[in-house]
Amino acid sequence: MEGFFFFKKLLIILGFSIPVIYIFNKIKVPSIIGFLITGIIIGPFGLRLIDDTAGIQFMAEIGVAFLLFTIGIEIQLSRFLKNLSEILLTGGLQILCTFLVGVGVGLAMQLSIGQSIFIGFILTHSSSALILKILKDRSDESSPQGKISIGVILFQDMMVVPMMLLIPFLAGGSGPDILMIIWKLIKSVLIIVALLAVARYLIPLVLENLVTMNMRDVLVITSVVIAMGIAWITESLGLSLAIGAFLAGLALSDTDFTHQIISDINPFRDVFLSVFFVSLGMIFNLDFLRENTGYILLLSLIIIGIKAAIVFGLVSLLKYPLRVALLSGVLLAQIGEFSFVLASQGLRENIISGFIYQGFIGASVLTFIATPLLVSLTYYLLARKNIFEDIPDGKINKLPVDNHVIVCGMGLNGRNLVKVLKNTGIKYVIVDLNYKKIKQSKAKGDKNVIWGDASNIEILKRAGIDSARVLVLAISDRFLTKQCLNVAKKINPNLHTIVRTKYVADIDDLVKLGADNIIPEEYETSIQIFSRVLRMFHVPNSIILAQGNIIRNKSYGVFREVRFTEEAFEQINQILAQGTIETYYVASGHKIVGKSLRDLNLKAQSGATIINIIRNNETITHPPGGFILQAADQLIIFGSHSAIDLALEILK
């Protein structure tokens, strides 16, 4: 019967979520808020359709774990380790500054030292689930604000262990001594490193053997077992489920299985994650809100203001532009899941009163509701800001270049382009937000390098945008890409722009903004694949290149199935229906050397005809049957595709 009641709870949650999400989608409000409202409606303080949330909370934790698992896969271990020092610096400073401010707030409320320290603890954490969901919905995980936010919340999760250990001290009891706490911290780091090392080398071997079975259900089950298994191990060793799931994802990144695993895990993740947000709404006490509306609203504003201001200040100190600092601040402005765990523990240990606890819960849920709205508002305002305000050229120290290429983004594509430009003597300017990459470029002898936001009009004018010939946008931040393209085209409408994007959905927007060439990574891979296939059917390179250009010039409409499909593929059908030409080189020692064309008798055997022979850079047209073949001859063969195939097989 217990299982039936649990099934009933899940059915109520999902059933009520559908109409609420539908309504919120119609009024263009983020779905996360819809899930929170659903929880408030059906929870113990609403219609009371669900009173006991114990089993629901467990499902919610699984949802967060699955989310961190997929994020870990997409982040990639190599990139994570490369940015580890920055993660530790930003995360450590955020926790320290927020903790100190929290202690100050507690003392201002005339709480004891122990209670004030506890307020600092619960204020430091932000929500992994909420932040990652917002970033994922916007495909913004790889942006600077995405990387900063993910790094900070991961560091916050690791700090839960020492905070939990210190709670008995704050309650006035005899908790573990300081050496025990230090040992626990060291042990946590060792556990993370050991699990990551083992998983990194063991799991891909297991998956490789299972994939050969060609049974998709086995891969799905294995993926779930890996994610939940490592999460369970970390939970058993005193860490969180979320940390373990993230480590499992990192272990599988950079392998051949990542894309399939993500597609298999996503349905589980979405269901469980929706339960998490609904469960969060269930703990919102409407009666307490009605009685203390002003107190909870003020507390919510204080929490958002403090956390956003601290992150904004820290990110600005790290020399990131205003846009990144603002977005990072609002993304991390809410209270986190582990804060609820700490608050519950503090209530049980009598560190905080029931009034403070209920006020904290109410304000925290309101910060959850406010965060998606604040993020959307920030993006909107950044897109609408007056970026075209005229700046006198005399105030900008322009680089001494013209008719040059501006390369925005020094990732793999940007670095490779710069190498080619340098070798061919074409002038270029590099713009990047990552100061380390700028420093490396300067060390390699690049003089025209600029650190800064490529969408900033001053940065672009310093790079000589008005006299540039080409702008290449090879950056991972899709919002920044569109902003930069918009600004650049406004300043210099004749500028030729080449834009790389990972997101197919951005193609139409980039076309509207004036992009001359758009390179979607997946579609370019598709062109390379079909080009190689057509070569196997001996379609001439000129035709293959022309076909690729047709597809590119029509914004990849063939692949997106929006237009031109019949027209483009009809050209391929016509090409394949016609005869074609292939070249064959006669190597030294080949069996046909010294034989005549009559002896070879290629047309009779295959249907293909040798129409020309190139010898010593001279073309012999329609050679006679008695023509003797020599080494280094090039045979020009004409025939149908099948005839050419057979002729080449005979010659080989």
Image (tube, rainbow, N blue to C red):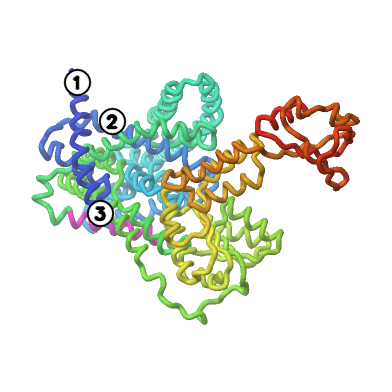
Please report the bounds of the magenta region as a residue range: 297-315
Residue 647 place in picture, x, y as percent: 74, 29
Does 307 appear above or below 548?
below
With 529 as the anchor, is 504 left or right in this view?
Answer: left
Q: Amino acid at mark 3?
A: Gly
Residue 523 place in picture, x, y as percent: 51, 44
Q: Nearer the viewer, mark 2 or mark 3?
A: 2
With 576 as the anchor, is 356 left or right in this view?
Answer: left
Q: Could you give the CA–CA distance between mark 2 and mark 3, rounded to whole angstroms?
A: 31 Å
Does 328 appear above or below 348?
below
Rendered residue at 22%/43% (across/down): 22
Quarter of the image with the N terminus is top left
Residue 505 place in picture, x, y as percent: 41, 49
Residue 34 place in picture, x, y as percent: 22, 44
Mark before the other along the chain sequence, 3 or 1: 1
- At mark 2, the secondary structure is helix
Please tell me how crowded label 3 is: few (under 14), some (14-19), or many (20+) other residues with Cα within 10 Å.
many
Residue 4: give its label. 1
The residue pinned by badge 2 equals 58
The residue pinned by badge 3 equals 106
Mark before the other along the chain sequence, 2 or 3: 2
Is 312 contained in the magenta span?
A: yes
Quarter of the image with the C terminus is top right
**Residue 194 in sight:** yes
Q: Amino acid at mark 1?
A: Phe
Q: Nearer the viewer, mark 3 or mark 1?
A: 1
Q: Amino acid at mark 2?
A: Phe
Rendered residue at 62%/38% (across/down): 578
Can you tell which quarter of the image residue 48 is in? Answer: top left
Contact between marks 2 and 1 (CB within 8 A): the answer is no
